[in-house]
Each structure stands twice: as C-alpha cells, then as structure tokens.
Amino acid sequence: MVGAASEALFEAAEEAAAGRSVIKPAERRRWIETQIEPRLKALETPPTAICCWTTAQLAKGIKEAERRLRDVVDLPLMLERDLRRHELFRRGDANRPGVRGVSLDRGAVESGLRRSALSLELVAFPLIHNDVLSGSSPVQWHGTEPMPLGLLYQQPYLREAVERCLSDKPIGRRLRVAARWFSEAHYANGSDDAALALGVCLDALLGGERALPGSAMGDRAALLTRDPSERRATRKSYLEFYGIRSSVAHGGRSGKLNGDALSAAFALANAMAWRLLDFENVFAPESDAQVDELFDDLRMGIVEWQVGD
C-alpha cells in the first residue's frame, strides 16, 4: 500500500490487514513525529511511504519490502509518457530512489548538511514491527533528489496501468521485470551500461519461453504496433538498437551509441510497454505459452488487430 506518509496510510493498512500484524498507534505516531513532520516543515513535496507485509524479518524483511518498492517505483518510471515534465532526468545512480547507498562521500555530506533539514533526505528510518521486535528502525541511506512518486500516481492513467502490471498474469510479470531493467538503464552511470540494461528490458517485453534471434524480436516489436503502416519503422528502430546493444555486449562500443540513440531506445521501450498492455487488453493471454502462440498467430494472420478494439 502506497500513499502520503501519514496516519491515514497506517489506518488504510490496518483496514487491509485481515488479521496480519499492524503497527501500534504509539509506534506509528512516534515514527511520524520524528521522520515525517520535520520533512513537512523543510520540503515542498510531502513524503510518500509504502506499507507492506513480508514473510521475512529484519534485514531480509527490508530486502523483501525493497523488491515491492522497486515495482511501484520502476513501473511508473517506465510507463510515464513525459519524464522530463516531472524532472526525472538520467543523472546516474546518485539519485536513485529506494533502500540503497549514495555514491557521494557520506561523511562530507553529513558534515555539510548537519544543521540543515535537507539532511533528512539522505537517510531513512524504516519502521518495522513483528512479534519478536517491536518498533525497530534501522538506518538506510538514500539519494539527494526525491522522486515525485506521489505526483506520478495522481495521474489516473498511470496508476491504473501500474495496478494492471502488479497482477500475476504473464503480461504483468514480464512488465515488472522490464521495468526493473528500464530503471537500471535510467540510473546507469555509463551509456554502455544503459544500453545493456535497455536490451534486457526489451527482451523481457518481447521475448518468449525460448531465446529468439534479433530478427524475430524485431518482428514482435512490429506486430505489437496496431497500424500496419508503422510496423516497418518500428522493426527498423528495434534492429538498429539491437545492433548497438550487441556491439556493447560483445566487448566493443558502437559508434552509434550516443544520446540520441539512447533516447530513442528509451522511447521504444516505453512504447513497447504500452503496446504490450494493449495486447493484453485485446487478446488476454493466460500463460507465457499463449503469449508465444498469439505472436505466431499475428505473424501468420490467424488473428489481427481490429480498429476500435
């Protein structure tokens, strides 16, 4: 459950608990007073928080929660149609949201910001509750620029798409994997690392139960495009990037790997993600085998996109 970090979020989690453990009122009030209220005084954007139940405890529980956090962070990053409007630029790993370390000198950062409320954005204290240890709050380091997750999820089209991706159906599963690698590419420090991560992202979106050659993957990218007049250009775009990604993967560096090529690849991944959601909406595959079969049927003309679907 994700929302503004407040009592209302804890109350909503308590309503959804269905017998599972919940944070006691005194513990959550103390956490809000020490971790949230100072941020509300210092920052323009209210903090967003996630509540979830894990099967593991303590450090392993944090890892499990981080995986769920990554889903709700990575999916809107991949599916948002205008990242620049939200100032989500590709600036390397230093500002990646989530439970992780910063790439800056922590000692220098802490010393420089010791008297500033901005230091609150460099460290987080997750609130953990279980039957053995109540109110545990370990220290976790974060980046220097908060992600506007709340603003992203205020967009109904994006929230609805993410909710669909969180299902256990085959399209939802591959979209979550693809979003993880899209995020890796977005926060990569090097263009070669970004190209490799985007390649895996597209593999997750377009791949099958067995490995497919680049030409077959290009065909799938084209087949996801409703308008037949646009399919040749889509296939060409995929194969151009596939050549760049292959050069990097085999230890080289393509002369075509520049900012424009990467931007085109990010745009292609975003388009393929939305078209895959469209594919699910129209054809509703229930297994990975059915996904493969539908791509074959589209290729052979057994099934077709219909105008107005």
Image (tube, rainbow, N blue to C red):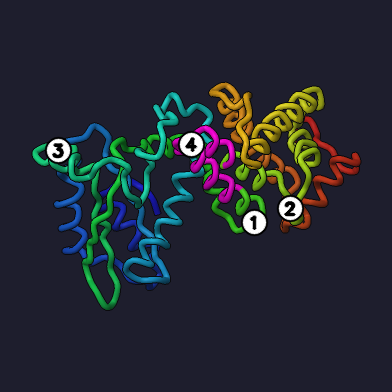
Front-most of 282 and 267? 267
| First-in-chain label (3 vs 4) | 3
Of callouts 2 and 1, the N-terminal one:
1
Q: Residue at x 56, y 50 (%)?
A: 176
Find residue 186 and name its label.
4
Residue 113 numbered tag? 3
- Region of the chain picked out in magenta, as a range: 175-196
Q: Are marks 1 and 3 in contact (CB under 8 Å)?
A: no
Which of the two discs, 2 and 4, labels the residue nearer the N terminus? 4
Amino acid type for the residue under numbered disc 3: Leu
Disc 2 and disc 4: Cα gap in Å? 29 Å
The secondary structure making up most of the magenta span is helix
**Which residue matches tag 2?**
285
Query: What residue sits right under mark 1 in the picture?
Result: 169
Residue at position x 50%, y 27% in the image: 82
Whether pointer 2 and pointer 4 mark residues with C-beta atoms closer than 8 Å, the reply is no
Crowd around label 1: few <14 · some 14–19 · many ≥20 (10 Å): some
Q: Say whether residue 231 is magenta.
A: no
